[in-house]
Image: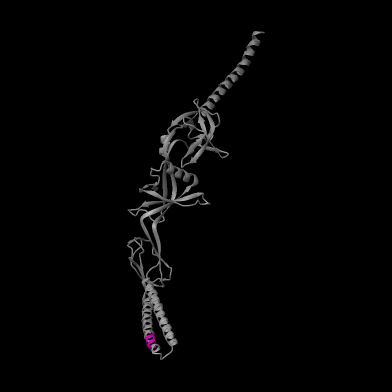
Amino acid sequence: MSPKYRRSLVWLLLPTLSIAGASCTETSQADNTKTAVAVEVLPVLELVAQDTVLHHDYVADIQSIKNVEVRARVQGFIEKIYVDEGKEVKAGQPLFRINDAEYKTQLAKARANLSNAVAQSRVAQLEAERVRLLVDKKIIAKSELEVAQAKLRAAQAQIDEARSAQSTAALSLSYTMVRAPFDGIIDRIPLKVGSLVDNGTLLTTVSDNRAVYAYFGVSEGEYLEYIKTRQQHPSRNNNSVQLILADGSQYTPPGKIETVESEFNEGTGSISFRARFDNPHKILKHGATGRVRLSNTVHDVVLVPQKAVFEIQDKNYVFVVDAAGKVKQKSFVPSTRLSYFYVVKSGLKPGEKIVYEGMQDLREGATIRPRPVLMGQILAGAH
């Protein structure tokens, strides 16, 4: 091969080698970039078996221990209102006065009828005594005495009827003065002085707020958990509950579960509990809302945060991380679902590490760089 030909061949090969070298460099850089992207830093939680206090929060309907609608018992015009809305009243305290002129007249008439009936009865009694004397002397027939005694009994019945009418009239008159049925707080008064009311018209509502009831629905699974805990630890105060107010603050003092209804609601699948809370400062009002927090201590359980769980075909999965940082899907069976956690029944055990957050883009077999998080931090944040 001539020197000139060799020089030409070298010049032809140099660009090819340069292109190949550049391609190798680009491929290497791309591989490094892919590796850097694949190795994400994700929070990883090590599962532990522990005793913990679990909190169940339930929406509560708060009602006064007594809440009574005060309604008119007679027809008439409101003549006087003795109280104002939102004020405290005592049992028997006057609230409203309905015009009573008509009912006073009815009572006077009933009294007059009673007096007349008593007089008629006296006349019938004297007549019966006179007839008895004549019969004893055999001046008139015995049948005349029977007639006189029948008239006496009729007159006495008229007395009973007149007394009943007088009592009714007196009762109607008493209804014109509307009084508080018990100690409590007056609600809104929709009618004013001069308003015409009928029998049954709502005048106001009185609430006894010295204590309140909180009604809340519990699912069947959580109800069974509550019952089992009471049976296993009868000496503990398993009836104590907390009330979380609408602003997120915790109400004091704590309340106590008093009763559970006898059947589950078919529509919601829950059963209603009733808790009682003392209300010495009258903070709680009838119709308020809040959340009842029921606490329960469980022993040697494995908790899995709901954030770490995803579902595939109605099964629960987590990403388990091995010592090399490689992730793998693993299913588990929960025994119950709480506000922020699952309680593991099977499938996971203490010591396993799972991805806590950021699993949306993870794939089976991917490699991550774990950033440890502690269960204590998660529990504190959940509550």
The answer to whether residue 294 is visible is yes
Rendering coords of residue 82 (x, y %): 33, 67
Question: Is 8 displayed left or right of 64 in the figure?
Answer: right
Q: How is the image coloured?
A: one colour
Q: Which quarter shows the C terminus?
A: top left
Question: Is 218 displayed left or right of 279 in the figure?
Answer: right
Q: Which quarter shows the N terminus?
A: top right
Query: Looking at the image, which is closer to me, 171 or 373?
Result: 171
* Residue farthest to the top, as pictured: 2
Tell me if residue 44 comes above or below residue 119 in the rendering. Answer: above
Give the number of callouts. Answer: 0
Q: Which residues are magenta?
A: 128-133
Query: Looking at the image, which is closer to me, 95 or 113?
Result: 113
Report the predominant secondary structure element of the magenta stretch.
helix
* Residue farthest to the bottom, as pictured: 139
Q: Residue at x 41, y 35 (%)?
A: 376
Rendering coords of residue 223 (x, y %): 47, 46
Q: Residue at x 45, y 86 (%)?
A: 143
The answer to whether residue 99 is visible is no
Query: Looking at the image, which is closer to me, 147 or 352?
Result: 147
Residue 107 belongs to magenta span? no
* Residue farthest to the right, as pictured: 1
Tell me if residue 69 comes above or below residue 215 in the rendering. Answer: below
Rendering coords of residue 310 (x, y %): 53, 37
Q: Residue at x 64, y 10 (%)?
A: 6
Question: Is 41 displayed left or right of 133 in the figure?
Answer: right
